[in-house]
Image (cartoon, helix red, strand yellow):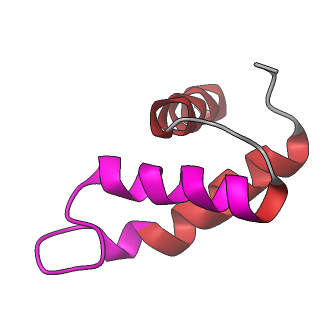
Amino acid sequence: VDEWGEPETKFLLSKYNDYMTSVGTRKTFRTVKSMFQRISEDLKEELDITRSWSQCQNRYKTIMRRKR
């Protein structure tokens, strides 16, 4: 399934907002990639939806482009 539904999109945005402040040197996530890897793992654990970290990142970028 390549389509993103509303529940996983909302989950992605929520996790992004939660985790973004934890990205940087000496924080939970050293890189944005590692943050998206965690979001990917959370999607699998909490919603049983498998998405790669890059799919999560691409989805986020797509949503942000549409909001402009």
Residue depicted at 88% across the width and 50% down the height? 7
Q: Position of residue 63 (x, y in %)?
A: 63, 34
Boundaries of the magenta span: 20-45
Residue located farthest toward the right when viewing the structure as drawn: 6
Quadrant location, the C terminus: top right
* 8 in relation to 28, above or below: above
Quadrant location, the N terminus: top right
Q: Quadrant of residue 64?
A: top right
Main secondary structure found in the magenta portion: helix
Q: Quadrant of residue 35?
A: bottom left
Q: Quadrant of residue 62?
A: top right
In reply to whether residue 21 is colored magenta, the answer given is yes
Left or right of 16, for residue 30:
left
Q: Position of residue 40 (x, y in %)?
A: 57, 49
Q: Position of residue 16 (x, y in %)?
A: 54, 60
Left or right of 1, for residue 41:
left
* 26 in relation to 41, above or below: below
In reply to whether residue 35 is colored magenta, the answer given is yes
